[in-house]
Image: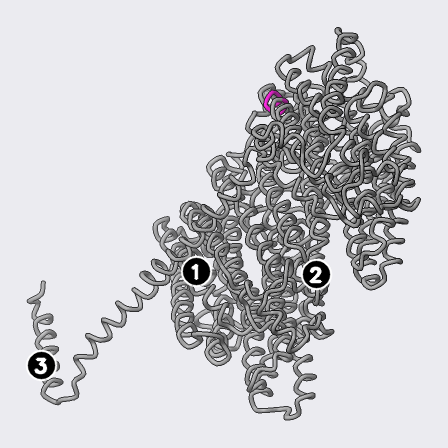
């Protein structure tokens, strides 16, 4: 087992190293190598998932020891790990293939595919890690690979800023996560997940809300939740397949996965707070998405919103449902991001949806698969999103009414902005040269779309999941199916997407270069577009507080430490030397005088006059 | 004398002899000079790595060399070389950085190159001797050997304001060294040890009852004396100015290796000898270290010059080492050693890369660069890796040091706030590090650089430049990916020295309740 797991983990690292050393100049070989690696990961992952009977497999070895503290490098493959492993390996492989088509003309392919391999390595590390510190290590490494890939078009100012922003904002989250880990270690004496679970079982009162929230900071940073959500929309400056893999399907979902891994630590208060944060994010991001013009930013906000749903599910005490939504979301969101990539590629990197239009006829496969994604995320009955999202809604309906109301409003919005995106992009008439000349992409790009579309349709049928994959989801979903108000929920859920669809078709069926919302409800549009000024607030902090304060400290340092203390001391010494120098005047009388004074002094001392 | 001892002695004598050769203008021919330079600077590196691999952590000291007929026996001073678990990784680190600095110097194209190499190899000889000495007198003496060439080299080959800066740094560091020497001598006099080295001092202290008040005073001397040498806030201003003005090789060796002298003294000598005094000084040390991390870190954010940003950044990261020492535990001190090794490598690499950038752009001002990654992808790659190493990304050695230090701070409730404030540093260093990368390598090329490129196209790293950079980066990655390569020997040595402190602290340790056997443990499958 362990040789399989370790070879799967280190395969992509090896591939990245080989690319770095030998394939820097040969894009074709580098991309092939990386795709083969992703294929290898998929095969190994499937073997790891299905070839063994044990429900929990664990292995570890010493990694670092210091002063009585021992860190172990370990692998823990249990229910959630298996499911995420499948998602990462499978979606990752499809996106690698898609990248072959999408990046075909990019001169920096070795760097891109090397970065993807590093990402796969770090993401697999998070999935398999058996202790918090190891998760933290790979956590930072996915942050690094995300930085690297966002900065792919580094010569643009946008990518340069976005990559830095993503890393630093994630670091803010990691700051809390780090403190949480250290508190956990000194509270429980271990950071191993299985041991922690046992200890938390044994003495449930050890965990404090502060500790939980500190750990949850990691989730807030990585999953881009309030108030650290600002980096994700900007991260869209990276290549589109990267956005699909890292900023939609896997890395951002790692935050939710972290919560699942340590759910036994969480106190009621912490859970309540996370649930509320998630629900509010689900709604807030929906409003933001409504006023975006960039196809990728709309999808980014939609990701934020769906991550909010997962957090809400977790906060309401249904981690299995959260993981279920994570899985279906990975399918349909990866599908839509790749679909947008297909559109962007066909339209020569035009990303403004108002410059598209009429693409359904020109790119039928992309349009069809994209529509499936839209239907799935909106929760149209019997598609994957319907099952996972309505499970969350039903849970909220039964256990927490205020959160249900927020989430329901979010669901209406989801359907609205998604159909808006679909209508403006694919229906109507072409509104720019690029879109009127667009042609459907090669099979390398449409193939993954078709597979993901299929999964977006069937991914919600839990009975199709093999036991090895669904073991963690089972208990929570069984609870869901036994909850009351089932029929009522079907009506409500269906009404949500229908309301959204109706609004969207009224507003957005016929559009020109301007957003109809901005003409009919300019005030509302402006509020949505402002995104409640978070970016401006942070910008203000950096430009008007942090940087001036840094410059102020620099001046203070120069003035007080270098100036007053160091130079001052030197000055005082110089003053003494000046005084001492005045004694040396070079005349014999003066020296005789000093000599006499000295002799007198000695005499007085010797006779005891000073005592 | 066996092979290992010869290597140990040779790593000091070879550069010293080389220095003489260079000084007397041998060899005359430029090519031969370079070749000789490679040998002279390569030997300590080779010796360091071999001795690192051969080190057997079972006994305290390895590869002992003793020459006790120096004529100073009455004072208890003998020429005694050996490596222990703490000094062995630092010794190897000094060798590697020395090699990098040497290659940079050989190809620096400085005028009066033989003199430059002579001084640099003298400095290297002192650095190797410093970590190899068991005897405290020679430990100190070798430090001075390394220090004096620094002043001359800054004064002769430095950048702007080199005269005044070299004077400032001279006075400042001599003062620091003098204070710490005072502390060391006072300690020796107080306990009247038969020999002036750690084992004998330690034995003597346990026999004589040193008054708490005098131990407190002596530790204060050592703390501030060594502190000045390591740029403890607020005694740090010499460092940034000095590194800024110093030629690259000197910055590399000074910031990377020589500055670790003070920390090494504190961890290896002062704290284990005077544990109670260390505990009472620890709050002072912690507060000042926070000054290093937050205030100096903020000043680093404000820098517009690439090199001074690196200088301030290196001063900032010394704060973590101080925090590790201030935690007064084996975990803290051992992690501080880890960080010292990694920091020495990473900061030297940063200075080296900065000089490569300077060679191509003729400036250190970040606003006059931009977009360099297009022309120099490999340099950008190295520089991003080095920056990420300094900001403590896992996978590089610095991470283990920083993490261990943070962990050691969490041990005691009193230190929790120090932990929270110090951990802010990981955000701060990301801010200035990534900002620098973005300004230098990403975005659009500045107009100044455009002008320059028109005159002379910018080329990527040459083989001679890749060699030292990849050697240093490789070592950083080795420590980062496989920390067990150095941690057990440090752990073993520190564990013995800090056992007294750890038993004191263990009373304060939080209770954890292992539940062996009560809950089903996960099945292990091979």
Q: Tag 2: Cα neighbours inside 10 Å, few (<14), some, or many (≥20)? A: some
The residue pinned by badge 2 equals B381
Q: Position of residue A180 (x, y in %)?
A: 59, 34
Instruction: Determine whether the residue tagged by mark 3 lies in a helix, strand or loop.
Output: helix
Q: Is residue B198 above or below residue A545?
A: below
Q: Alpha-carbon distance for marks 1 and 3?
A: 46 Å
Across and down, in percent, residue A189 comes to 62, 33
Residue A273 forms part of the magenta stretch: yes
Residue in view at x 91 percent, y 28 percent = A53
| Viewer-closest of B23 and B113 | B113
Q: Residue B272: in sight, yes or no? A: no
Magenta stretch: dominant secondary structure: helix
Q: Tell me the magenta residue range.
A: A271-275
Mark 3 and mark 1 in contact (Cβ < 8 Å)?
no
Earlier-in-chain disc, 1 versus 2: 1
Give the label, 1 or 2, closer to the camera.
Answer: 2
Residue A246 appears left or right of B236: right
Front one among A494 and B524: A494
Name the residue carrying label 3. Answer: A596
Determine the CA span between mark 1 and mark 2.
Answer: 31 Å
- Which residue is disc 1 drawn over? B236
Kindly report the distance in space between the C-alpha atoms of the residues bearing marks 3 and 2.
75 Å
- Same chain for marks 1 and 2? yes
Mark 1 packing: few (<14 Cα in 10 Å), some, or many (20+)? Answer: many
Label pair 1/2, CB-CB below 8 angstroms: no
């Amino acid at each position: 087992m362990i040789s399989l797991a370790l070879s799967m983990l280190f395969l992509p690292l090896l591939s990245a190293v080989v690319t770095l050393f030998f394939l820097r100049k040969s894009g074709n070989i580098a991309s092939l190598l990386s795709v083969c690696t992703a294929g290898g990961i998929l095969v190994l992952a499937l073997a790891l998932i299905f070839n063994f009977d044990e429900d929990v497999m664990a292995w570890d070895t010493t990694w670092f020891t210091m002063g009585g503290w021992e860190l172990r490098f370990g692998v823990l493959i249990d229910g959630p790990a298996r499911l995420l492993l499948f998602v990462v390996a499978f979606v990752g492989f499809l996106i690698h293939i898609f990248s072959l088509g999408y990046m075909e003309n990019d001169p920096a392919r070795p760097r891109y595919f090397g970065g993807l391999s590093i990402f796969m390595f770090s993401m697999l590390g998070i999935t398999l890690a058996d202790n918090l510190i190891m998760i933290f290590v790979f956590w930072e490494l996915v942050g690094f690979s995300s930085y690297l890939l966002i900065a792919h078009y580094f010569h643009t100012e946008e990518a340069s800023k976005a990559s830095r922003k993503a890393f630093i904002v994630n670091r803010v989250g990691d700051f809390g996560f780090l403190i949480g880990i250290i508190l956990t270690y000194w509270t429980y004496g271990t950071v191993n997940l299985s041991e922690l679970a046992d200890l938390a079982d044994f003495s449930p009162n050890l965990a404090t809300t502060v500790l939980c929230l500190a750990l949850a900071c990691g989730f807030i940073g990585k999953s881009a939740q309030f108030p650290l959500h600002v980096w994700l929309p900007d991260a869209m400056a990276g290549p589109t397949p990267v956005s699909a893999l890292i900023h939609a399907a896997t890395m951002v979902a790692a935050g939710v996965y972290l919560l699942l891994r340590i759910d036994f630590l969480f106190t009621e208060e912490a859970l309540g707070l996370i649930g509320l944060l998630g629900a509010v994010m689900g709604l807030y991001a929906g409003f933001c998405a409504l006023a975006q013009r960039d196809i990728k930013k709309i999808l980014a906000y939609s990701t934020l919103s769906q991550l909010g749903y997962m957090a809400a599910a977790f906060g309401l005490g249904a981690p299995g449902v959260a993981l279920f939504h994570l899985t279906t979301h990975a399918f349909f969101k990866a599908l839509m991001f790749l679909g947008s990539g297909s559109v962007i590629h066909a339209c020569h990197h035009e990303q403004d949806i108002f410059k598209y239009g009429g693409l359904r006829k020109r790119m039928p496969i992309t349009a069809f698969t994209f529509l499936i994604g839209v239907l799935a995320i909106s929760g149209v009955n019997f598609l994957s999103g319907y099952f996972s999202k309505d499970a969350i809604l039903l849970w909220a309906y039964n256990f927490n009414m205020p959160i249900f109301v927020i989430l329901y409003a979010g669901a209406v919005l989801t359907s609205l902005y998604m159909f808006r995106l679909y209508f403006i992009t694919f229906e109507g008439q072409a509104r720019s040269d690029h879109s009127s000349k667009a042609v459907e992409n090669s099979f390398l790009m449409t193939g993954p779309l078709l597979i993901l579309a299929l999964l977006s349709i069937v991914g919600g049928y839990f009975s199709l999941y093999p036991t090895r994959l669904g073991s963690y989801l089972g208990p929570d979903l069984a609870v869901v199916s036994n909850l009351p108000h089932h029929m009522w929920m079907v009506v409500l859920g269906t009404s949500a997407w229908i309301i959204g669809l109706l609004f969207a078709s009224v507003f957005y069926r016929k559009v020109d270069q301007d957003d109809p919302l901005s003409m009919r409800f300019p005030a509302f549009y402006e509020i949505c577009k402002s995104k409640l000024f978070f970016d401006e607030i942070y910008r203000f902090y950096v430009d008007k507080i942090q940087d001036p304060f840094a410059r102020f400290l620099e001046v203070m340092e120069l003035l007080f430490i270098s100036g007053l203390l160091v130079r001052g001391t030197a000055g005082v010494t110089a003053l003494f030397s000046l005084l001492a120098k005045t004694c040396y005047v070079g005349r014999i009388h003066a020296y005789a005088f000093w000599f006499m004074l000295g002799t007198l002094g000695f005499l007085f001392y010797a006779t005891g006059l000073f005592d | 004398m066996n092979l290992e001892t010869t290597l140990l002695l040779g790593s000091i004598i070879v550069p010293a002899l080389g220095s003489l050769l260079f000084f007397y203008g041998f060899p005359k021919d430029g090519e031969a000079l370079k070749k000789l330079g490679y040998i002279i600077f390569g030997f300590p590196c080779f010796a360091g790595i071999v001795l690192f691999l051969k080190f057997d952590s079972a006994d305290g000291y390895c590869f002992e060399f003793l020459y006790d007929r120096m004529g100073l026996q009455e004072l208890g001073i003998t020429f005694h070389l050996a490596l222990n678990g703490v000094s062995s990784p630092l010794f190897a680190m000094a060798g590697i950085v020395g090699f990098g600095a040497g290659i940079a110097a050989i190809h620096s194209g400085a005028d009066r190159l033989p003199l430059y190499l002579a001084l640099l190899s003298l400095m290297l000889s002192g650095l190797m001797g410093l970590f190899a000495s068991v005897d405290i007198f020679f430990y100190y003496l070798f430090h001075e050997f390394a220090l004096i060439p620094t002043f001359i080299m800054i004064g002769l080959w430095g950048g702007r304001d080199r005269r005044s800066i070299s004077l400032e740094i001279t006075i400042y560091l001599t003062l620091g060294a003098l204070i710490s020497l005072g502390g060391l001598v006072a300690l020796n006099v107080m306990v009247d040890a038969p020999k002036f080295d750690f084992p004998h001092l330690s034995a003597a202290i346990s026999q004589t009852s040193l008054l708490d008040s005098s131990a407190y005073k002596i530790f204060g001397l050592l703390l501030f004396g060594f502190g000045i040498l390591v740029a403890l806030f607020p005694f740090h201003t010499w460092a940034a100015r000095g590194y800024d003005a110093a030629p690259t090789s000197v910055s590399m060796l000074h910031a990377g290796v020589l500055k670790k002298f003070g920390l090494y003294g504190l961890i290896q000598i002062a704290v284990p000898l005077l544990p109670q005094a260390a505990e009472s000084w620890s709050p002072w040390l912690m507060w000042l270290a926070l000054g290093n991390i937050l205030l100096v870190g903020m000043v680093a954010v404000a820098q517009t010059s690439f090199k001074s940003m690196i200088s301030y950044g290196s001063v900032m990261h010394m704060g973590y080492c101080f925090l590790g020492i201030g935690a007064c535990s084996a975990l803290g001190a051992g992690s501080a050693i880890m960080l010292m090794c990694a920091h020495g490598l990473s900061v030297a690499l940063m200075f080296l890369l900065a000089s490569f950038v300077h060679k191509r752009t003729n400036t250190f001002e970040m606003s006059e660069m931009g977009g360099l990654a297009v022309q120099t992808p490999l340099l950008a790659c190295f520089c991003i890796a080095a920056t990420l190493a300094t900001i403590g990304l896992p996978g590089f050695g610095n991470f283990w040091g920083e993490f261990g230090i943070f962990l050691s701070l969490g041990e005691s409730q009193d230190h929790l706030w120090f932990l929270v404030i110090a951990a802010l540093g990981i955000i701060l260093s990301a801010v200035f590090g990534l900002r620098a990368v973005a300004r230098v390598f990403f975005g659009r090329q500045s107009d100044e650089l455009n002008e320059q490129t028109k005159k002379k196209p910018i080329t990527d790293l040459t083989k001679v430049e890749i060699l030292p950079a990849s050697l240093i980066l490789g070592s950083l990655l080795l420590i980062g990916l496989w920390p067990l390569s150095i941690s057990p020997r440090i752990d073993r040595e520190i564990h013995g020295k800090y056992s007294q402190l750890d038993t004191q602290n263990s009373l304060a340790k939080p209770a954890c309740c292992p539940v062996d056997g009560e809950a089903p443990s996960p099945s292990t499958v091979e």
